[in-house]
Image: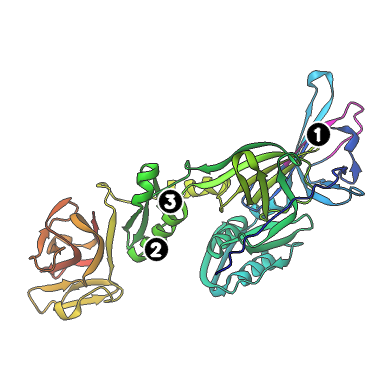
């Protein structure tokens, strides 16, 4: 008989007699803290500490850039849980008490202050990451970046270093966090486990804040817009099962670096696979948990809801003087609000011409003949990445290779860039057994003989016609 092995986890509670301290610019402020929140998490999370300080004696006079350190453990209170720099100081005299409200950013925020312009051809992910630290992060180290030998060619142009790292995490299926000594930790998502702390009913857990699946971020219809030769590249990827379960939820992504329909297809399919299903997420309010580590898989045990599983800790916040910890849990990788806002900004700057909301594209530029059926074409010339007819003949015929389309083509819209475009006629065929159908540029046209093998035919009759690029948008 085959044996089935399952992991068992029996939690043994520990003594929660804690000691903690907080220093600002080397001065202990523990006895003056009215409230303090000290976060830690992966790099895509906002890690801003907040301190409300009794300053009735006006003994404190801190400045932006002063170092905030929060230490907490079960022994001498010397284990560093948060370190960063003051970003904001405000004086407050509400309630008849002179207070200082201080906000400080963890060292992780410094990754946002650096803009990167670099190109890495065929380089290992971990090598790229280390090179970026060497070049752009003075004072940071990478003793805990695990080797990822997966290679890629990637270009960063005026991109915040934080976004570069998030891109690498996404491609490499990794998690990254910066510790309080400015050392960067990177490892495969879900590969690290923490058995030194756990969220457990009747021990550490005070309240469980809705741990479960959330379909709010489900996206099961992804339309990607790229650009080729000044014309749109379009691909739409859909998941019918997800749409049935959660209704159709769309996402539109604009990225002009996607200059070919195959690239757009791969990108859209990847986004669909990532977001077609709900993520499991939630948070828990707990008694102080000094042994948490960002991105480590940590047990949550709550029998009333039949929860006994490991979850990824994406962020946690130590709160004093009450000595509680709020733990944010997730089963999958998330994108921070900061990252989403950046994506929205980039999309807002793009201008793609698709008035009829077509779903796909077949794009042509003429720096080579890769999409031309050479044996079926005749009397054309390519020069300076433009196609034209041989002036010694009355007409040139250009026929494309057949494209296997993901849908049955029922309507098309052809756009072109060039000179004297009316010196040519344009034709499409979606069914190889049907005759070509003439199409007028910039006009939505119903395909009379539908099919899944799309071809373009161009007949050029004017010696002055030059075509730089052309696209068939279709659905």
In magenta segment, residue 58: yes
On the image, the x and y values in percent for residue 341 come to 53, 45
| Eye-nearest disc, 3 or 2 | 3
On the image, the x and y values in percent for residue 356 come to 24, 47
- The residue to which callout 1 is attached is 322
On the image, the x and y values in percent for residue 145 come to 68, 67
Q: Secondary structure at mark 1?
A: loop
- The residue to which callout 2 is attached is 266
**Callout 1 environment at 10 Å: few (<14), some (14 to 19), or many (20+)?**
few
Question: Could you tell me if the residues under marks 1 and 2 are in contact, i.e. CB atoms within 8 Å?
Answer: no
- CA–CA distance between discs 1 and 3? 40 Å
Residue range in magenta is: 49-62
- The residue to which callout 3 is attached is 276
Vertically, is 15 above or below 391? above
Q: Earlier in the sequence, mark 1 or mark 2?
A: 2
Question: Could you tell me if the residues under marks 1 and 3 are in contact, i.e. CB atoms within 8 Å?
Answer: no
**Callout 3 environment at 10 Å: few (<14), some (14 to 19), or many (20+)?**
many
Q: Dividing the picture into quarters, in which one does residue 453 lie? A: bottom left
Residues 393 and 240: in front is 240
Q: Residue at x 24, y 68 (%)?
A: 403
**Image quarter in which the N terminus is found:** bottom right
Q: Secondary structure at mark 3?
A: loop
């Amino acid at each position: 008989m085959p044996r089935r092995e399952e992991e068992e986890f029996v939690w043994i509670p520990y003594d929660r007699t804690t000691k903690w301290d907080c220093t600002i610019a080397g001065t202990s402020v523990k006895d003056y803290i009215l409230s303090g929140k000290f976060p830690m998490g992966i790099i895509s999370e906002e890690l801003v500490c907040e301190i409300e300080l009794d300053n009735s004696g006006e003994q404190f006079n801190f400045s932006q850039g002063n170092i905030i350190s929060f230490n907490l453990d079960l022994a001498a209170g010397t284990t560093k849980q948060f370190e960063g720099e003051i970003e904001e100081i405000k004086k407050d005299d509400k309630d008849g008490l002179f207070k200082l409200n201080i906000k400080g950013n963890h060292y992780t925020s410094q990754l946002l202050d650096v803009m990167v312009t670099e190109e890495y051809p065929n380089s290992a992910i971990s090598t790229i990451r280390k090179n970026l630290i060497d070049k752009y992060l003075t004072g940071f180290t990478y003793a805990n970046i695990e080797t990822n030998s997966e290679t890629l060619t990637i270009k960063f142009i005026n991109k915040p270093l934080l976004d570069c790292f998030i891109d690498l995490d996404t491609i490499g299926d990794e998690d990254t966090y910066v510790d309080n000594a400015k050392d960067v930790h990177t490892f495969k998502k879900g590969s690290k486990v923490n058995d030194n702390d756990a969220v457990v009913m009747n021990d550490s857990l005070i309240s469980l804040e809705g741990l479960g699946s959330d379909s709010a971020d489900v996206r099961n219809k992804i339309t990607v817009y790229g650009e080729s030769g000044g014309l749109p590249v379009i691909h739409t990827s859909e998941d019918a099962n997800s749409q049935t379960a959660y209704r159709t939820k769309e996402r539109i992504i604009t990225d002009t670096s996607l200059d070919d329909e195959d690239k757009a297809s791969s990108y859209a399919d990847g986004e669909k696979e990532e977001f077609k299903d709900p993520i499991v997420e939630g948070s828990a309010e707990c008694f102080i948990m000094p042994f948490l580590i960002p991105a480590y898989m940590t047990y949550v045990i709550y029998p009333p809801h039949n929860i006994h599983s490991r979850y990824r800790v994406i962020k946690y916040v130590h709160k004093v003087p009450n000595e509680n910890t709020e733990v944010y849990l997730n089963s999958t990788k998330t994108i921070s609000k900061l990252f989403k806002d950046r994506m929205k900004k980039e999309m807002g700057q793009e201008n793609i011409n698709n008035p009829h909301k077509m779903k796909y594209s077949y794009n042509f530029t003429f720096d080579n003949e890769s999409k031309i059926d050479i044996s079926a074409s005749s009397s054309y010339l390519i020069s300076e990445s433009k196609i034209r007819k041989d002036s010694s003949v009355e007409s040139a015929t250009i026929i494309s290779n057949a494209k296997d389309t993901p849908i049955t083509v029922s309507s098309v819209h052809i756009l072109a860039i060039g000179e004297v475009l009316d010196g040519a006629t344009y034709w499409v065929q979606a069914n190889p057994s049907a005759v070509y159908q003439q199409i007028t540029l910039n006009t939505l046209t119903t395909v009379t003989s539908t099919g899944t093998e799309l071809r373009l035919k161009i007949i050029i009759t004017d010696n002055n016609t030059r075509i730089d690029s052309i696209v068939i948008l279709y659905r």
